[in-house]
Image: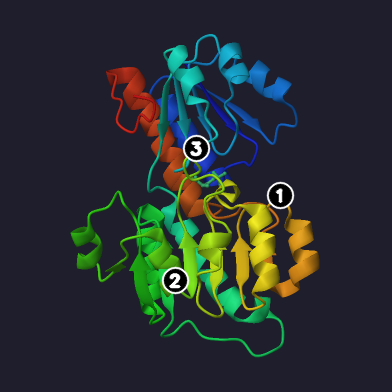
């Protein structure tokens, strides 16, 4: 059996070594394709593999069609909007993610971005403090939960909206539960975004929600750029000179945003939420273990195309 690690954005060396060890201990062969520059390279690499590990790499219908022997693909991470699930299902390929494995890295970045934006992106001038401010966790999954924990340390008041998590669970963790997304945005000076990109959530954060934020409102997006309505973001930033937007995944119109709004907007140059060696090791090794377990025993825990 052959397992391919196909990562445009490579894992840390220590994670690749760990994956190799797990794969070879299971009696399989590891193939590595990193920093590839064309889809053709990926098509060639998947041709003879039984399993594959990816990060945000797009596993399209074309990739699946070239992967004649592929049985399982694992997205080493949380969001699996990069996998064409219907194409996988049609070919009987099991698709999985590794929920929670890189969450701490993303949560730490979200917290850091709140401080960064509160302090003029570390430029001279009077900033503000997080102490006593309200932070809205949207939504309360693996990352959101950790952001809440860190924000508590800053002395922030934690609000959350998540229709998929029980109210009691959130309240038991000291969170003030909002009954609607509108309530969350109305009450919170900071919003930390943790919703996946789905047909329901794409472009769902726009003028109506953002204009409800209190004075000095800041949105920190370490989730997906697709959830923002970018045209409406421009409109609300034009109308409200107090609002700020920071993102780990540059908006399609980032250059326009910077030109118009300067230090009120920020984006990392390359998505870096999960770019820690710890997160790479956690998610990479979990992916390899899930593949071995599936190939040896048929275990489909974490399958997302059931
Ligand atoms: C995730 O969904 O797990 C994160 O967005 C990490 O993505 P990356 O593997 O491309 O860094």
Where's residue 187, x and y in %? 41, 74
Image position, residue 293 (x, y; %): 32, 26
* Location of mark 1 (residue): 252
The residue that appears at 75% across and 72% down in the rendered structure is 262
> Which residue is at the front of the view, 104 or 220?
220
Q: Check if mark 1's residue and mark 2's residue have beta carbons within 8 Å.
A: no
83 is higher (above) or lower (below) than 142: above
Q: Residue at x 49, y 72 (%)?
A: 190
Q: Residue visible at 20% across and 66% down? A: 172
**Quadrant in the picture for residue 239:** bottom right
Q: Is residue 168 left or right of residue 26?
A: left
Q: Mark 3 against mark 2, which lies toward the viewer?
A: 2
Query: In the image, which disc is placed on residue 199?
Result: 3
In this rendering, position of residue 142 left or right of residue 283? left
- CA separation, marks 1 and 2? 26 Å
Q: Is residue 23 visible?
A: yes
């Amino acid at each position: 059996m052959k397992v391919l690690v196909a990562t445009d954005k490579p894992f840390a060396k220590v994670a690749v070594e760990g994956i190799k060890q797990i794969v070879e201990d299971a009696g399989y062969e590891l193939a590595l394709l990193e920093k590839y520059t064309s889809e053709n390279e990926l098509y060639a690499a998947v041709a003879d593999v039984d399993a594959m590990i990816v990060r945000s790499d797009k596993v399209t219908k074309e990739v699946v069609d070239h992967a004649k022997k592929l049985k399982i693909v694992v997205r080493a991470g949380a969001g699996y909007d990069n996998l064409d699930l219907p194409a996988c299902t049609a070919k009987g390929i099991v698709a999985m993610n590794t929920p929670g494995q890189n969450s701490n890295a993303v949560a730490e970045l979200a917290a850091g971005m709140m401080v960064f934006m509160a302090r003029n992106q570390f430029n001279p001038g009077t900033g503000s403090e997080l102490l006593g401010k309200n932070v809205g966790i949207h939504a309360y999954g693996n990352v959101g939960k950790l952001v809440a924990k860190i924000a508590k340390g800053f002395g922030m008041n934690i609000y959350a909206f998540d229709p998929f998590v029980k109210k009691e669970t959130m309240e038991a963790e000291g969170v003030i539960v909002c009954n609607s997304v509108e309530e969350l945005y109305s009450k919170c000076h900071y919003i930390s975004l943790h919703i996946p990109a789905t047909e329901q959530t794409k472009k769902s954060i726009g003028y109506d929600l953002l204009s409800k934020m209190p004075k000095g409102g800041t949105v920190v997006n370490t989730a997906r750029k697709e959830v923002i309505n970018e045209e409406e973001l421009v409109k609300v930033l034009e109308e409200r000179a107090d609002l700020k937007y920071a993102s780990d995944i540059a908006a399609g119109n980032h250059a326009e945003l910077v030109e118009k709004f300067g230090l009120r907007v920020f984006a990392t140059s390359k998505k870096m939420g999960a770019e820690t060696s710890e997160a790479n090791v956690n998610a990479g090794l979990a992916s390899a273990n899930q593949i071995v377990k599936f190939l040896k025993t048929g275990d489909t825990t974490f399958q997302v195309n059931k």
